[in-house]
Every structure is written in C-alpha cells, then in structure tokens.
Image (cartoon, rainbow, N blue to C red):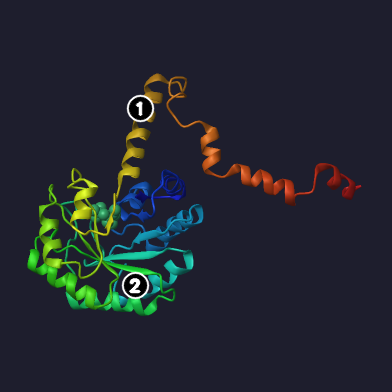
Amino acid sequence: MEAHNGLSARIVQEAGFKGIWASGLSISASLGVRDANEASWTQVLDVVEFMCDATEIPILHDGDTGYGNFNNVRRLVRKAEQIGIAGLCIEDKVFPKANSFVESGAHGLADMVEFCGRIEAAKDTQRDDEFVIVARTEALVLGAGMREAIRRAEAYRRAGADAILIHSKQSTVNEIAEFTEEWAQRAPLVVVPTKYYRTPASKFAELHIDLVIWANHIMRSAVAAMERTAKKIFAQQSIAEVEGEVAPLSRVFELQDADELAEAEAKYLPSTESSQLRVA
Ligand code: SPV
Ligand code: MG
C-alpha cells in the first residue's frame, strides 16, 4: 500500500499491510510538485527516512529512473540501505521522468542495455543480501509492444533484478494476463493496477503475480478529505461543523506515539522535586 510521509506510513502499517510503496507520485504531490523529478532525490529520501522511522514493515522505494545513470543508482542504493529502505524499484525511462499516466513531459524509454547496467550496478552495490531490486519496464505503457516488454523483462532478469514490475495503463487486466502467460514465472512479478482497478486480487493470484501495489490511494483519499474540510470551513467561517468529521487530536497523538514520550520522561527526566533540590 502506498504511503507518502511518516503519518500515512504509520496508518498503512496499522491497517495491516505487509509492506509500503513509497510512491514517487504521492510523495511529489504531497510536496506540491510534479512527478517529474522536480523534488531532488535527497529531498525524496528525507521523506522516506521519516517513513522508515515511523514503521517496522518493509518499504519499497519508488526510485523512478534511479535519478540518472548507473552511478546515480549506486549512490541511491547506498543511501537507501543506510536509511533502512528494504528495496528499490527503478524504471526503464530517461531522467527526468514523467508520470506514466500524464500525456505531457519526457517519456523516453531508456536504452535497454544501459538500463541493465543500472540494475547490475545496483546489485553490485547493495551490502544487505535481503535488499531487493525491482526492475520496472514501461514498454507496454509507452506502446513498444508485448515482444519488447518480454525482451526487456528477460534482459533485466538476467542483469540480476530480483523482480520485474510490468506496468500497464489499460483499463482491463488483459494485457498483463498476456504478459504473465508468456513470462511463465521466470522471476517474481509486480503489478500496479491503478487503471485496471476492477480486477480482483484472486485474479492476480491466478496469474501468478507475486506483489500487487495499490499505488496512490492514501494520497488521493487525503486530497479528497482535505478539500472537503477546507471548503466547508471557508464557506462556514467556522470549525464547529467539521469537528465531528475530522480525526480527534487524541488519535493524532496516538499515531505520534505520545504515550511513549510520557513514559520516557518519567524514566529519564528528574522529577520537579529533585531538580529543585539540585538547584538549591
Ligand atoms: C508511483 O506511485 O509513483 C508510480 C506508479 O510509479 S505510477 O503512478 O503508476 O507510475
Ligand atoms: Mg512513480
């Protein structure tokens, strides 16, 4: 499940999900910029570091193109491991990327051999054997065709990718189903069914898809809720009516683990009485 800051990551973990997608789209949207590498990679990693600090479940970082060539990817992997990210997903586009679903922007498909170098560099750089590299191909999204998608996925598998993310912008699962048949479980598969959202999870299991990412629904639900609240308060020039509709402050404190701080204060801070004695 997608999250885009420490708070949403905590909410996703509490909901019971086994892992978090640190979505480039959602993080950039929450920062008020476009999903076109407008936020620098260190600005993005700062956000993901807060997400790691707030949770215990694995975080798969949407690393876009890897923010450059193989050398940028090496540095990204090193920093991702230091922060506590569990895995990195990189896509076969050129920097700066554009979101798969926007018409405008630079949508160049990366040279396949050059992208394999990014994967190899990532695998050679990781120190923790458990760190995962997911290679994402945009071949279907950019209209390069099924043969090209399979050719690229196979090349990325051979380059050392732990899993392949096959992306599609069709409104049905048919294209993905065709891919999975041809792929025949050569390596774990990841999908992002944002556009073919009606597909039930059982269908993905049937197609031998190993990981399904619901990529942006926490951010989109926040946008809808924030717009509703802002409009209402502005129209009514009052907060009286929204009080019952928004999360109580006690819930916010709970998500921040405020009780833990109170317990730590009791343990580590001198009591008022003893500190007064020391001053005296
Ligand atoms: C993201 O969540 O940023 C993704 C998925 O990369 S998509 O928006 O479909 O490109
Ligand atoms: Mg993205």
Please, what secondary structure does the residue beneath circle 1 have?
helix
**In the figure, 96 relative to 213: above or below?**
below
Taking the image as shown, residue 51 lies to the left or right of residue 29, namely right
* Residue of label 2: 73
User: Foreground residue, 262 or 71?
Assistant: 262
**In the figure, 224 relative to 200: above or below?**
above
Taking the image as shown, residue 41 lies to the left or right of residue 209, namely right
Q: Quadrant location of ligand 2?
A: bottom left
Measure how far apart labels 2 and 1 are at the Cα level: 42 Å
Please, what secondary structure does the residue beneath circle 2 have?
helix
Q: In the rendered structure, which amino acid carries the disc numbered 1?
A: Lys
- Residue 5 placement (x, y as % from top left): 43, 50
* Residue of label 1: 231
Dividing the picture into quadrants, the one containing residue 242 is top left
Q: Is mark 2 within 8 Å of ligand 2?
A: no
Residue shown at the point (33%, 63%) measured from the top left = 63
Neighbor class of circle 2 (other Cα within 10 Å; few <14, some 14-19, many 20+) is: many
Q: In the rendered structure, which amino acid carries the disc numbered 2?
A: Val
Q: Nearer the viewer, mark 2 or mark 1?
A: 2
- Residue 260 seen from this side: yes
- Residue 235 placement (x, y as % from top left): 37, 21
Residue shown at the point (20%, 70%) measured from the top left = 186
Instruction: Name the residue furthest right.
Output: 280
Q: Are marks 2 and 1 in contact (CB under 8 Å)?
A: no
Give the total of numbered labels: 2
